Image (cartoon, rainbow, N blue to C red):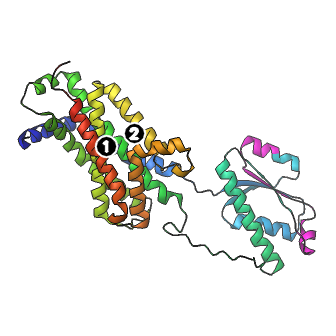
Amino acid sequence: MKYIRIAAIAKKEVLHIRRDPFSLAMAFLMPMILLIIFGYAITFDIDNISTVVVDQDRTSLSRGFVSALKDSGYFTILDYPDRYDDVDEYLNSGRARLAIIIPPDFSKKLRAGGTAPVGAIIDGSDANTASITEGYISAIAGQYLQKVRGARVIPLVDARTRVWYNPELKSRNFIIPGLIALIISVIVTLLTSLTIAREWERGTMEQLISTPLKTPELIIGKLIPYFFIGLIDTIASVLMGTLVYGVPLRGSVALLVALSCIFLFGGLSWGILISIIARTQMLASQMAILSTFLPAFLLSGFMFAIANMPEPLQLVTYIVPARYFVSILKDIFLKGNPFSLLAGDALLLTVYGLLVFAMANRKFKKKVV
């Protein structure tokens, strides 16, 4: 293997990238655009729940309960319908997701020291929002009951919870690290999936085949420019996640960059393998998107907990490299874990990268088919 040949192929690829504005835009602008779109669009935080209140009691106690809902910051009171039947119109049209029904004897039962039931009709078309809304209402009702009675009900078990790593419980703090892994895996694979296929389509591969260039030299030369592009995209995404979205980065930046390099090598090698198999840029781009975006989005633990998946799908996730990189990013960002706790995932990513690189070398033949 001669490094001068690798350098020549790398230089050739750099010249092509510079002359192709589409490749430049996809390499540098697309990750930032996707991070902005997905970063603001994907959230599990539930607030500003549109609410209507049917207050049939109309006393200071019922108004105090409604004020407690508003003051929590989770509920936005849209209207106060006079009749219970008017609730259907708000929920059916989607203008409200919650209706609170305060019965006429609400204050009477509270003053008597009894339990005052309050009706809550929740739009269950979004199960996640409905369950969180139910929890909010129960907590606020319990706090209001203690406030009205002027005494605290002491439970038999006093559970005192403390949340580590994400004490504010902001969904953005664990979404952004996973989103970085998703975007980088798609971009680097898509970029390199076009390299070999482009040579075949333009008829320049025959010229390369006729040279003394060896297969590993060709593949490594093709990988080098995109490796640095992927590294720049990764660093830019990390900076954007910390500076724009405010995600804490508690771990080592050097460790993050080093492990990202391992992931980039595997993703770039997978793109080269696709490019060798596909031979056309259209087919190669389709294969790259399907083989990276869907597994990384659905099976990496980025959006859905792997432990909650059916067992056959859990087994499939072990062959998705994004699973290990998502875990690494979350551990470095939120927990600040050292390399000793990340070595297992790093080893699996290394094995994956070397295996795919070897497959690409074996698959490419220096002959015209």
* Callout 1 secondary element: helix
Quadrant for the N terminus, please: top left
Q: Is residue 168 above or below residue 178?
A: below
**Mark 1, residue position:** 267
Q: Is residue 336 above or below residue 233?
A: below
**Which amino acid type is marked by label 2?**
Thr
User: Which residue is at a point 88% across and 64% down the rendered structure image?
Assistant: 58
Marker disc for residue 147: none
Q: Are marks 2 and 1 in contact (CB under 8 Å)?
A: yes
Residue 195 screen position, x and y as percent: 24, 32
Residue 5 screen position, x and y as percent: 8, 38
Q: Does the rendering let one see residue 100?
A: yes
Residue 189 screen position, x and y as percent: 32, 39
> What's the distance in space between the residues labelled 2 and 1, CA to CA?
9 Å
- 359 drawn magenta: no
* Callout 2 secondary element: helix
From the viewer's perspective, is 65 left or right of 131?
right
Mark found first going from the N terminus, 2 or 1? 1
User: Which residue is at a point 28% across and 63% down the rendered structure image?
Assistant: 254
State the extent of the magenta-drawn residues as a range.
Answer: 88-116
User: Which residue is at a point 15% across and 33% down the rendered structure image?
Assistant: 215
Q: Does the rendering let one see residue 20?
A: no
**Which amino acid type is marked by label 1?**
Gly
Exactly how many numbered labels are in the figure? 2
Marker disc for residue 292: 2
